[in-house]
Image (cartoon, helix red, strand yellow):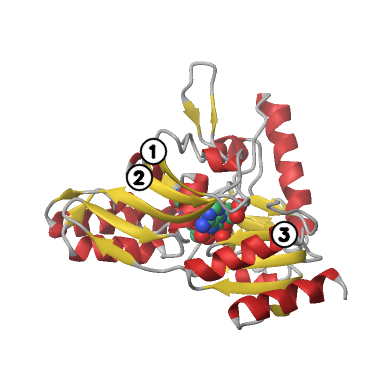
């Protein structure tokens, strides 16, 4: 039996549901780009996620775990292995903290917090994706990021070990966490909030959403958020990648259907039929013009998943 069939049969036997075959990844990504994954599986329980990962590791079958697909560029040729979409969803509210399963959407986390008059998560307003994806990349906006409100996260290592890591052990930095160096799948997280007035929270959220609406591409535009990370100057001050790009003349540049959004130069949008190769070529051109003008090397925030990569 070939490795794909072997894996498919083994997962079917272990959990009673087979992974799907040849699933277009364009449908799994806010960019709307990507060819077929050989195998695709939605894990709805921790047991299913663990089974898929441990089998993949045991059979040395390539795999990769995604959340909402809002910060990822899939390959035009798809993925030669198993894509696991994390659908572990659930929230438990405490007096000053919330425990959330990692596949829970950030809008749901915010709604639950608001309903329980728990404050401090307002900065998440308008950021799409799951808790797991947000923890992996330390997502944030307007001066706050999820690492600052995280008390602990439980992580599954590809070898099968489960660890509960403190905020310090998660090694958060700007759009960075220890999971980028030492692979681990976030299973759940505990977020620290403070009791407050939900009307004040609502007002903050409205304000943030208004600011985002004015700056970002309209809702539904195919993109993956800011393409590049902001960089820092010699003195450590943050320099917005969008400003550098705009001053370097990025607005209006395009390769195929991949184009720089006219009102915010750090957004690459898919105007219809963009391919990952178009996005990568445009991104390379953008890095080049910024380097030529400012001597700054921009670093990608969006994760590019090559067809032959693996979390192994
Ligand atoms: C319109 C738009 C606006 C955005 N605005 C912002 C913003 O203001 N601030 C910001 O920070 N980001 C922003 N983003 C990017 C995106 O929303 C965040 O990066 C988000 O955290 C991605 O979550 P996800 O579940 O979609 O992750 P995915 O895109 O599915 O995955 C991204 C990475 O996270 C990893 N990952 C996913 N789940 C897990 C898990 N359980 N354990 C370990 N690793 C995991 C994946 O392997 C992958 O490497 C924006 C995106 C869009 C489309």
State whether residue 18 is above or below residue 128: below
Camera-side residue: 223 or 67? 67
The secondary structure type at the circle numbered 2 is strand
State whether residue 56 is above or below residue 43: above
Q: Marks 1 and 2, Cα distance to the nearest angstrom? A: 6 Å
Residue displayed at 71% across by 29% down: 291
Residue assigned mark 2:
150
Camera-side residue: 97 or 8? 8
Please identify the quarter of the rendering in which residue 29 is found. bottom right
The secondary structure type at the circle numbered 1 is loop
Q: Marks 2 and 3, Cα distance to the nearest angstrom? A: 32 Å
Pointers 1 and 3 in contact (C-beta within 8 Å): no
- Res 142 visible: yes
Percent x, y of residue 190? 33, 51
Q: Select label 1 or label 3 by which is in front.
A: 3
Residue displayed at 71% across by 46% down: 283
**Tag 3 or tag 2, which sits nearer the N-term?**
3
Pointers 1 and 2 in contact (C-beta within 8 Å): yes
Please identify the quarter of the rendering in which residue 90 is found. bottom left
Percent x, y of residue 84? 62, 67
Answer with left or right where residue 114 lies relative to residue 144.
left
Q: Residues within 10 Å of mark 2 (few under 14, many from 20)?
A: many
State whether residue 20 is above or below residue 96: below
Answer with left or right where residue 173 lies relative to residue 120.
right
* Screen quadrant of the N terminus: bottom right
The disc label shown at residue 58, or none: 3
Camera-side residue: 207 or 159? 159
Answer with left or right where residue 170 lies relative to residue 12.
left
Residue assigned mark 1:
167
**Tag 3 or tag 1, which sits nearer the N-term?**
3
Residue displayed at 53% across by 65% down: 68
The secondary structure type at the circle numbered 3 is helix
């Amino acid at each position: 039996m070939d490795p794909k069939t072997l894996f498919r049969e083994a997962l079917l036997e272990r959990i009673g549901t087979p992974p799907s075959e040849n699933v277009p990844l364009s449908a799994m990504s806010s960019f709307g780009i990507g060819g077929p994954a050989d195998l695709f599986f939605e894990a709805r329980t921790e047991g299913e996620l663990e089974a898929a990962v441990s089998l993949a590791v045991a059979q040395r079958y390539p795999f990769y775990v995604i959340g909402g697909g809002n910060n990822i560029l899939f390959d035009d040729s798809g993925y030669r292995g198993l894509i696991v979409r994390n659908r572990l969803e659930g929230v438990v509210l405490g007096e000053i903290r919330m425990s959330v399963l990692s596949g829970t959407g950030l809008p749901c986390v915010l709604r639950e917090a608001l309903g329980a008059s728990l404050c401090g998560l307002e900065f998440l307003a308008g950021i799409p994706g799951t808790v797991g994806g947000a923890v992996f990349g330390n997502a944030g906006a307007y001066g706050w990021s999820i690492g600052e409100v995280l008390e602990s996260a439980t992580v599954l290592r590809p070898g099968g070990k489960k660890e509960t890591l403190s905020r310090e052990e998660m090694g958060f930095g700007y759009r960075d966490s220890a999971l980028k160096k030492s692979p681990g799948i976030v299973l759940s997280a505990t977020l620290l909030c403070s009791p407050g007035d939900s009307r004040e929270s609502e007002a903050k959220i409205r304000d943030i959403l208004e600011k985002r609406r004015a700056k970002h591409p309209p809702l539904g535009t195919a993109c993956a958020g800011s393409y590049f990370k902001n960089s820092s100057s010699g003195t450590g001050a943050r320099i917005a990648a969008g400003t550098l790009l705009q001053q370097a003349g990025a607005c209006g540049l395009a390769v195929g259907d991949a184009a720089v959004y006219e009102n915010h130069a750090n957004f690459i949008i898919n105007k219809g039929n963009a391919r990952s190769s178009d996005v990568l070529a445009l991104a390379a051109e953008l890095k080049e013009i910024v380097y030529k003008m400012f001597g700054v090397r921009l670093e990608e925030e969006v994760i590019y998943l090559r067809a032959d990569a693996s979390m192994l």
